[in-house]
Image: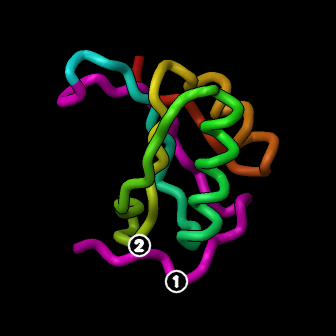
Amino acid sequence: MLREPAASLPAWEQSPRVRLERAGRGGKIVTVAGPLVLSRQEAEALLSSWKKLCGSGGSLKAGKTREALPAFELEVQGDHADRLVDELLKAGYKAKRSGG
């Protein structure tokens, strides 16, 4: 089992990537944002606000940063990559879109 972040890093210190995934999901598209080093409570609050913004479901997955720090990846059902990049930039993250 992967560990969870004990505390959140400030937004300006994080560079999450937002991508679309379809593999292993029965052909359905999912927008994935991460890695984000956030406490579980902050990650759940962010995911909840994104689900309301996009009008769809989503989930929280444990992962790691490139430096092997514990982190979360937030998944939102559907193609919402541009909208989530805008939201991350507004919140002070150095977010970018990755993939096609």
Image-based side of 18 in relation to 21, left or right? right
Image disc number at residue 59:
none
**Where does the N terminus fall, quadrant-wise?**
bottom left
**Residue 19 position within the rendered picture, expressed as x and y whole percent measured from the top left:** 44, 30
Specify the quadrant of the image occupied by residue 100: top left
**Which of these two is toward me, 39 or 92?**
39
Above or below 80: residue 84:
below
Q: Earlier in the sequence, mark 1 or mark 2?
A: 1
Please state the extent of the stretch shown in magenta in the rendering.
1-25
The residue indicated by pointer 1 is: 6
- Residue at 45 percent of width and 29 percent of height: 77
Image-based side of 100 in relation to 91, left or right? left
Say which of marks 1 and 2 sits in front. 1
The residue indicated by pointer 2 is: 69
Reply yes or no: does residue 83 show up in magenta.
no
Specify the quadrant of the image occupied by residue 28: top left
**Residue 47 position within the rendered picture, expressed as x and y whole percent measured from the top left:** 59, 48
Image-based side of 30 in relation to 24, left or right? right
Image-based side of 87 in relation to 54, left or right? right
**Helix, strand, or loop for circle 2?**
loop
- Residue at 21 percent of width and 26 percent of height: 23
For the view shown, which residue lies furthest in the bottom direction?
6
Q: CA distance from mark 1 to mark 2?
A: 10 Å
- Residue at 75 percent of width and 40 percent of height: 89
**Residue 98 position within the rendered picture, expressed as x and y whole percent measured from the top left:** 46, 29
